[in-house]
Structures are given as structure tokens and as C-alpha cells.
Image (tube, rainbow, N blue to C red):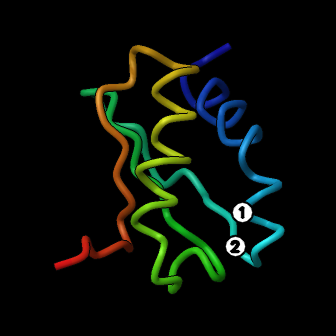
């Protein structure tokens, strides 16, 4: 199983919760440095809690399931000020 498949499998564990809230997530890229770049879709892209969802849910699921991933970033998420 390649890296993208492993990350997709990790995302599938939390995807039902995202979909239940009207959102989803898509892999945009996995860099040579093993950084996963994601795009938050639907409500996940505009929700005030998106930053927490990203850090506490999505990032944790990926990093736990695929230890060779060094970082997870959302390309369309602005960090709270």
C-alpha cells in the first residue's frame, strides 16, 4: 500500500464524522518531505471550529496511522488569530 492509500485509509476513519457535519477532506498532495496537504471541503472549509477539527481530528488520525508523515496542513485553512 502506498503512502496516499495509507493516508486515505486514515481519513476514512474520521470521514463519517466530517460528512455528518456537511464537510469532507481531500488530499491535494503528499510532498517529498512527507507533508500531507489537504483541502477542507463543504462546511469544514468555513466552520469556525475547522482549526480544531484539523488539529485534534484529521492530523491526529493521519499521524497515528502513518508515522512516516511529518506534517499535515490544510491549504485552505487560516489559523486563528
Work out whether 8 lies above or below 48.
Answer: above
Name the residue that disc number 2 marks: 23
Tell me where residue 72 appears, x and y as whole percent.
37, 43
Tell me where residue 73 appears, x and y as whole percent.
34, 52
Work out whether 23 lies above or below 72.
Answer: below
Q: Secondary structure at mark 2?
A: strand
User: In percent of the image, x 50 and y 64: which residue is there?
Assistant: 39
Q: Are marks 2 and 1 in contact (CB under 8 Å)?
A: yes
User: In percent of the image, x 61 and y 73: which residue is there?
Assistant: 41
Tell me where residue 62 appears, x and y as whole percent.
53, 32
User: In percent of the image, x 55 and y 47: which residue is there?
Assistant: 57
State the CA–CA distance, disc 2 to disc 1: 5 Å
Q: Is 40 on the left or on the right of 23, as rendered?
A: left
Q: Is 17 on the left or on the right of 60, as rendered?
A: right
Image quadrant of residue 22?
bottom right
Graded by Cα atoms within 10 Å as few (under 14), some (14 to 19) or many (20 or more), the crowding at tag 2 reads some
Q: Secondary structure at mark 1?
A: helix
Name the residue that disc number 1 marks: 18
Tell me where residue 32 appears, x and y as whole percent.
28, 28
Work out whether 3 lies above or below 41.
Answer: above
Assign the C terminus to one quadrant of the image: bottom left
Q: Is 8 on the left or on the right of 77, as rendered?
A: right
Graded by Cα atoms within 10 Å as few (under 14), some (14 to 19) or many (20 or more), the crowding at tag 1 reads many
Which one is earlier in the sequence, the residue at label 2 or at label 1?
1
Assign the N terminus to one quadrant of the image: top right
- Total labels drawn: 2
Q: Nearer the viewer, residue 77 or 4?
A: 77
Image quadrant of residue 69?
top left
Amino acid at each position: 500500500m502506498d503512502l496516499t492509500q495509507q493516508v486515505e485509509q486514515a481519513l476514512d476513519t474520521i470521514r463519517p464524522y466530517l460528512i455528518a457535519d456537511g464537510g469532507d477532506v481531500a488530499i491535494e498532495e503528499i510532498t517529498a518531505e512527507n507533508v500531507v496537504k489537504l483541502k477542507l471541503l463543504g462546511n469544514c472549509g468555513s466552520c469556525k471550529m475547522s482549526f480544531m477539527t484539523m488539529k485534534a481530528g484529521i492530523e491526529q488520525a493521519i499521524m497515528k496511522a502513518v508515522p512516516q508523515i511529518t506534517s499535515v496542513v490544510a491549504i485552505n485553512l487560516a489559523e486563528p488569530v
